[in-house]
Image (cartoon, rainbow, N blue to C red):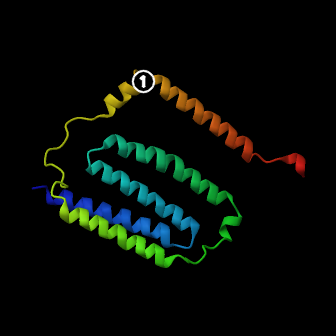
């Protein structure tokens, strides 16, 4: 059997993740929605830690919290017109509810009919981060550098498209 302390901590992080994700969806204020997205990302990273996927957890924090969420918050805070925008009322309640019920039914069906869904009691020893780093910098260095050049080109293109054109004033 697993340690009851780990089970309580797991359910605590799961509840934080689900509640903050629901707050992201249902709140009308964009700033509050963006800040609750922070807790959703951190909760997902904590759940990755419980799955012994430490590299994915660190990647979740670095990429989503460190990059995407900060970019989103700066975009929201530097845009004046975003504060005047209110979310419109949901008009697709019936299809959304049907999809929600279908997804919950599919998950419950999978939960109750699959017998091998529980993780094993043995924990992984060591970390896979060293192996991923070695493979990235030796065997896959060319694709890694090609992706970095592609991302740099996309960043330069986005900066060019978003620049303020002073000649039109």
Q: Where is residue 14 shown, x and y percent of the image? A: 31, 62
Q: In the drawing, does residue 160 fall left or right of residue 86? A: right
Above/below status of 41 relative to 135: below
Q: Residue at x 13, y 49 (%)?
A: 121
Above/below status of 128 relative to 113: above
Q: Viewer-proximal residue, 124 or 143?
A: 143
Q: Where is residue 86 shown, x and y percent of the image? A: 63, 73
- Residue receiving disc 1: 137
Q: Viewer-proximal residue, 150 or 14?
A: 150
Q: Where is residue 132 shown, x and y percent of the image? A: 35, 31
Crowding at mark 1 (Cα within 10 Å: few <14, some 14-19, many 20+): few
Q: Residue at x 36, y 70 (%)?
A: 102
Q: In the drawing, does residue 45 fall left or right of residue 94? A: left
Q: In the drawing, does residue 11 fall left or right of residue 19? A: left
Q: Quadrant of the N terminus?
A: bottom left
Q: Residue at x 42, y 59 (%)?
A: 40
């Amino acid at each position: 059997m697993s340690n009851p302390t780990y089970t309580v901590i797991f359910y605590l992080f799961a509840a934080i993740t689900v509640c903050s994700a629901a707050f992201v969806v249902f709140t009308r204020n964009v700033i509050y929605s963006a800040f609750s997205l922070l807790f959703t990302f951190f909760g997902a990273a904590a759940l990755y830690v419980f799955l012994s996927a430490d590299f994915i957890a660190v990647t979740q924090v670095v990429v989503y919290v460190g990059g995407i969420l900060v970019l989103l918050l700066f975009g929201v805070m530097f845009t004046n017109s975003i504060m005047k925008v209110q979310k419109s009322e949901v008009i697709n309640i019936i299809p959304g509810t049907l999809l929600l019920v279908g997804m919950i039914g599919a998950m419950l069906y999978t939960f109750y009919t699959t017998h091998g869904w529980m993780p094993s009691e043995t924990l992984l020893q060591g970390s896979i981060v060293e192996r991923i780093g070695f493979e990235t910098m030796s065997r896959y260095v060319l694709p890694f550098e090609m992706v970095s050049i592609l991302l740099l080109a996309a960043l330069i293109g986005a900066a060019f498209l978003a620049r303020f054109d002073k000649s039109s004033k």
